[in-house]
Every structure is written in structure tokens, then in C-alpha cells.
Image (cartoon, rainbow, N blue to C red):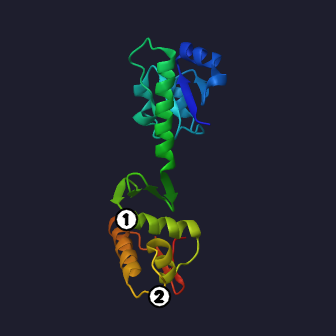
Amino acid sequence: MQKVFIVNFNSLYEILEEIKENLFFKIVKLENEIDLINNSDLDIMDSLIISKNNHKLLLHKKITDKNILNLNDLPLVLTKLLQLINIKLMKLKFNHQSKININGYELNINSKVFSKNDLNLKLTEKEIEIILYLYNTKTKHDVADLQKHIWHYSTNIETHTVETHIYRLRKKISDLFKDENFILSHKNGYFIE
């Protein structure tokens, strides 16, 4: 269940606490922004934060403006507030689920960006399919297997499509990230450790 951290906003916390049985999220009360910033154990990646002092929260490396709900137009009808919270939580969940960590890299399926250490590489749909297939299956895949599962070709068709795509993908990763070992090859096929 996603969490909404209510920071230094006791009146809001008390209102939500009264109706918590009807909420689709868990509320967590924190006395001040420092409690949130200093607590590295809190899972805030797909959580929402509501606070009166949002500028302090942005000092935390895991908090972005996407995690913060600004309540600038107070007073606010409770149904409107709940609607704002639910929409923000859905967006966070969608964004969080679209990101996959693979050997120190982050693959964002929505934006088709492969990133590491503030370097971003735009990938094609087919390149994403190759990476996910090799990573999720954890075995070595020969050309015929990749033709069948990625391109949906019959195994007896003569083509260099697989080798060409793998070569180009490895080159892109090597050029930007200086990583020669992301996609490995073996006599039994290609794989990602």
C-alpha cells in the first residue's frame, strides 16, 4: 500500500486519520521535515509527501517535486483533496513500475531511456525487448532463439538481424557508458548476468 507522509501538518493528519478506513493509502505522521530528510529507511520512492515547508524536503536526494503535493489553494474541499492525492499516487506508482534496475542501470520503459550515473541513452522498442528478454530469462540465447522470441521469425530463415541489433546495442552502451560487458556472448549465445 502506498504511503502519504504528512509532515508538520497536524490538522490535515487528524482529518485523514478520522477517515483512514476509507482511504486507499496509508498515512504517516512526521513532526518535521528533518525527520523525513534524516531517515534513510523510509521508502519514499512511490510515496507522496504533504508538508507546509516543501523547499526543505528537496534537500533529500530521493525526494523530487513528483513526490510532493503542494496545497497552495487552501481551504480545499475534502473530496477534492482526496482526488488530488489519489491522482498523484497513481502517477507515482505508474512511474515507479516503469523503471527496472538491471546491473546498476535503470531502464525506464515509458521514456525508453537507459541510464546510469546521470548518463542517458535513448533506446528503440526492439532494444528494450532484447535487454528485457536476456535479463529476465537468465540463460544464454542463441540467434535462433532470439529470432523466434523477439522477432517472431521462423528458426530456419537466414538473417543477420539479431547479430546486427546486438552489435549496435552493445556499441551504443559501450560508447556512452564505457561498458563492454553488459551484453555478453558465449558459444551458446548472448546473455546478461
Label 1 to label 2: alpha-carbon separation: 35 Å
Give x and y (percent) for residue 53: 43, 22
Give x and y (percent) for residue 104: 49, 59
Give above or below for 190 relative to 50: below
Label 1 residue SS: helix
Relative side of 135 to 108, left or right: right
Q: Quadrant of residue 139?
A: bottom right
Q: Residue furthest right?
A: 21
Give x and y (percent) for residue 149: 50, 73
Q: Residues within 10 Å of mark 2 (few under 14, many from 20)?
A: few
Q: Nearer the viewer, mark 1 or mark 2?
A: 2
Lower sequence index among marks 1 and 2: 2
Quarter of the image containing the N terminus? top right
Identify the residue at horizontal 45%, vertical 30% (top origin): 68
Q: Nearer the viewer, residue 68 or 178?
A: 68
Tags 1 and 2 touching, CB below 8 Å:
no
Quarter of the image containing the C terminus? bottom right
Q: Which residue is mark 1?
A: 177
Q: Residues within 10 Å of mark 1 (few under 14, many from 20)?
A: some
Give above or below for 104 relative to 78: below
Identify the residue at horizontal 47%, vertical 82% (top origin): 154
Q: Which residue is mark 2?
A: 156
Q: Nearer the viewer, residue 77 or 114?
A: 77
Task: Identify the amino acid type marked 1.
Answer: Phe
Q: Which mark is residue 153?
A: none
Give x and y (percent) for residue 51: 48, 22
Identify the residue at horizontal 40%, vertical 55% (top origin): 117
Relative side of 60 to 41, left or right: left
Relative side of 70 to 141, left or right: left
Task: Identify the amino acid type marked 2.
Answer: Asn
Label 2 residue SS: loop
